[in-house]
Amino acid sequence: MLPPRCAVQVCHVLVLVLCMSAAEDFDWTKNDRSSFYYGTFPAGFSWGAGSSAYQTEGAWDKDGKGLSIWDVFSHKKGRVLRNDTGDSSGEGYYKVKDDVSLMNELKLNHYRFSISWPRLIPTGIKSDHINEKGIQHYNGLIDHLLANKITPIVTLYHWDLPQVLQEKYGGWQNASIVSHFNDFANLCFEKFGNRVKYWTTFNNPWSVAVEGYETGEHAPGLKMHGTGAYRTAHNIIKAHAKVWHTYDTQWRGKQNGMVGISLSGDWGEPVDINNHKDIEAAERYVQFYLGWFATPIFHGDYPQEKSYIKGTCDFLGIGHFTTRYITQKNYPASRGGGSYFTDRDLAELVDPRWPDPGSEWLYSVPWGFRRLLNFVKAQYGNPMLYVTENGVSEKMMCTELCDDWRIKYYRDYINEMLKAIKDGVNVRGYTAWSLVDKFEWDEGYSERFGLYYVDFKNKNKPRYAKASVQYYKRIISSNGFPNQREVETWKRRAIETCSSSNQLLAAEEQRSTAANILRLIHDPLTSHMEMVTEIVVPTVCTLCILLSAVFLMFLLRRRN
Ligand code: NOJ
């Protein structure tokens, strides 16, 4: 037993320590980029995972669906890596029940998905035809989610524009798109709005504008330098505002939901924080990404339609993956020629120590996430935020379920989001990107973002949990990172469980490769090239290596 005076002193010290740590809570972590913050999220914080229609559904020409610009783009040779297409992808269209059971395994609170416009309105023009089967499909998905207590967060446009609208009018280049998109949105509110309360009009419009109409890496593949991106963005901003007003005037009273937009933004950190040119360039980087859309929507700082566009966001979706160091570029005026990139006038750099396990552009820089969230808070009056995308890919061609790098990415990014909430940022939910592996746009199936691995070679497209499933599950069930002792056991346990699943999957893959070989033998008409590249070449190479090894050993023996 402690003597009473001593006990009082101990209590005094304890209280002091507690007070200091509470006061320093935020400062302690603010400048230290590598520190980890143990703590939990506010009660009611919503945990989810996401997908998009073209990336996961498959069934590209089934049940009356019309063509989208991605169907057409991916079918043109040379546009997508290895000429992959989303024709069948992970067959998500047929796997609603399976995928909802994965969500249950994770105990998700919400699921973010997008509605395919041409599945509902095949030509994109509502007066032409409405596809009832498309409506039935999304009704089924929404009902099944709700029956499992999973809140749907629905995106109206995740890049799959009806091809007819592109061909007839030039897609997002033409102002007429605004009313067609509004008709589509109105139909969705009418059919699903009694059950869907969270809508985002657009997913990552930056990509639609820049990659679709400026660089042409994405559908529709147009390279309209200096005009394409700007015109697209202009029509998207107007379309977003129109849809928000439609909801506000016609549906909000009955349905009581919210309409936002999901913007993507990398964080830009000045290379030299003492150089004002770098500071300005870094600010431009973020403004040309996120501010391009967020400023008119939140501040109305936009010609002509100021008051119509201002305030058209009930919540803001944020998609974030990575960070860059930024410095001023100084493009010579004569060389500019007018393009989004010369206008931005900056150079992007990366730290070679940043981990980059998957996509070439995706470096893991968790502290950038907290900065971006704080930037949004400061610039746009601390709006209600939902993180609509965050995650990391792997490039591995072989099976790998033990994704410890993804565990680290999620752990550290989610922790930075927690710190941002402690900073006062109003984040209400988080969406891991993505639920299952899927078609990764111009990179085809070469980049896997899923928490669940999809065996694309198997026609049943089975899903297997990666180790990150176990880890994310723990974060969700603890609503954060309760304490060091507990959190440290999570990763070990996750990796333990994945090694047995890894073996299972490898065996299954061997079995399906053998089945494919048999199929090729029995079906001589099947692509000769497939046979040569998948079987003959690897077999001949292996034989050559074996023969050389035997020959070498033979030579060595003779020498001895
Ligand atoms: C953002 C896009 O919205 C999503 O579709 C894509 O999978 C991720 N970036 C990763 O590239």
Image (tube, rainbow, N blue to C red):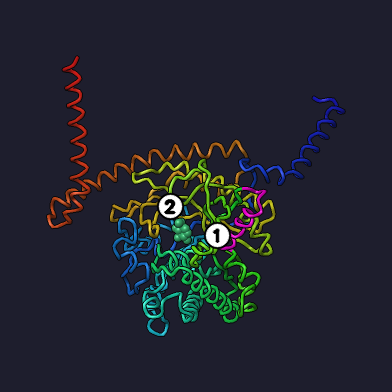
Split into 4 quadrants, where in the image is the C terminus? top left
Q: Residue 476, image x and y in percent?
A: 55, 50
Near-viewer residue (153 or 264):
264
The residue depicted at 36 percent of the width and 54 percent of the height is 445
**In this picture, is 358 found above or below 439?**
above
- CA neighbours of label 1 inside 10 A, class few (<14), some (14 to 19), many (20+): some
- Mark 2 C-beta closer than 8 Å to ligand 1: no
The residue depicted at 26 percent of the width and 43 percent of the height is 510
Split into 4 quadrants, where in the image is the N terminus? top right
Residue that label 1 marks? 345
Task: Find the magenta span and give its range.
Answer: 272-290
Under mark 2, the amino acid is Gly
Instruction: Tell me: 241 left or right of 404.
Output: right
- CA neighbours of label 2 inside 10 A, class few (<14), some (14 to 19), many (20+): many
Instruction: Verify whether residue 285 appears in magenta.
Output: yes
Tag 1 or tag 2, which sits nearer the N-term? Answer: 1
- Mark 1 C-beta closer than 8 Å to ligand 1: no
Residue that label 2 marks? 450
Quadrant of the rendered image containing residue 383? bottom right
Instruction: Tell me: 276 left or right of 357.
Output: right
The reply to whether the C-beta atoms of the residues labelled 2 and 1 are less than 8 Å apart is no
Labelled disc at residue 531: none
